[in-house]
Image (cartoon, rainbow, N blue to C red):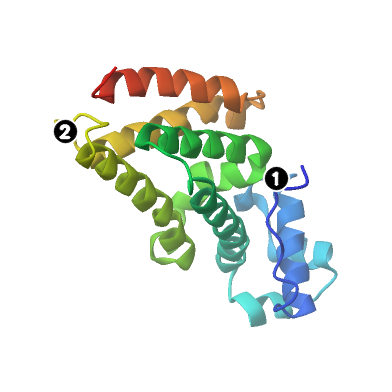
């Protein structure tokens, strides 16, 4: 899909660095990150292993940088897409659909983010994780605004509601990631929104 992949950092990255990142993206379509070696990346990128160490230090940092490209792109997209939308529930629906579409259109990225990277040392201290948290902050801000405006029930914890929404999205996507099933962003969005919104809407 032409608009589903982030633009690479080719304008600012040295060619060798970008080759390494592109090589990892390609390899991740074939195998899990834990099975990828320095030699695999060097061979795919057609560079020597010393260059990987020079730019990244270790393989986890290569993964974090690849992930950072995706996270930055989708954070910008989600943040832009909710602008101009009236109503907190409509904004939440847009975020939910975007994430379902995001995970369906980029299954390699979704697998890394939802299944692999959270178990890697250093991820929760990385810049990538800080950007990822922006999604949660945006969602929580929308929920709090909806409560303040009387659109969402005020007896619900914004944090708990945010966690319920993201938990529903992730668990709905896992079968597709684990078993290769196709996912339908429209249908999944409709299902999650029906369940969640009927419970939280102050004026059903």
Question: Residue 196, position in %: x, y?
Answer: 35, 23
**Residue 201 picture quarter:** top left
> Where is 149 relative to 80, above or below?
above
Q: Which mark is residue 47?
A: none
Could you tell me which residue is drawn at 56 percent across and 25 percent down?
175
Which residue occupies the extreme left position in the image? 155
At mark 1, the secondary structure is loop
- Can you give x and y, in whole percent of width and height, for residue 34 in the image? 60, 51
- Measure how far apart labels 1 and 2 are at the Cα level: 46 Å
Choose between 38 and 89: the one closer to the eye: 89
**CB under 8 Å between callouts 1 and 2?**
no
- Would you say residue 128 is visible in this rendering? yes
Q: Quadrant of the C terminus?
A: top left
User: To which residue does mark 1 refer?
Assistant: 31
Q: Quadrant of residue 39?
A: bottom right
114 in relation to 34, above or below: above
The x, y position of residue 44, in whole percent, is 82, 61
Residue tagged by mark 2? 154
- Kindly tell me whether residue 121 is visible in this rendering: no
Helix, strand or loop under label 2: loop
Q: Quadrant of the N terminus?
A: top right
């Amino acid at each position: 899909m032409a608009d589903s992949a982030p633009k690479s950092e080719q304008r600012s990255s040295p060619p060798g660095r970008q080759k390494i990142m592109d090589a990892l993206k390609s390899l991740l379509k074939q195998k899990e990150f834990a099975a990828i070696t320095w030699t695999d990346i060097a061979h795919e990128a057609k560079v020597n292993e010393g260059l990987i160490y020079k730019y990244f230090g270790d393989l986890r940092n290569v993964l974090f940088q690849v992930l950072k490209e995706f996270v930055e792109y989708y954070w910008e997209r989600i943040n832009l897409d909710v602008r101009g939308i009236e109503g907190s529930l409509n904004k939440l629906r847009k975020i939910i659909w975007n994430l379902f579409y995001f995970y369906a259109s980029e299954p390699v990225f979704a697998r890394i983010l939802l299944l692999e990277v959270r178990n890697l040392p250093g991820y929760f201290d990385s810049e990538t994780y800080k950007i990822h948290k922006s999604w949660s902050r945006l969602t929580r801000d929308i929920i709090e605004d909806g409560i303040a405006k009387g659109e969402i029930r005020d007896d619900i914890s914004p944090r708990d509601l945010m966690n319920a929404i993201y938990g529903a999205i992730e668990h709905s996507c896992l079968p597709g990631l684990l078993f290769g099933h196709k996912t339908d962003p429209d249908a999944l969005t409709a299902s999650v929104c029906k369940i969640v919104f009927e419970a939280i809407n102050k004026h059903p």
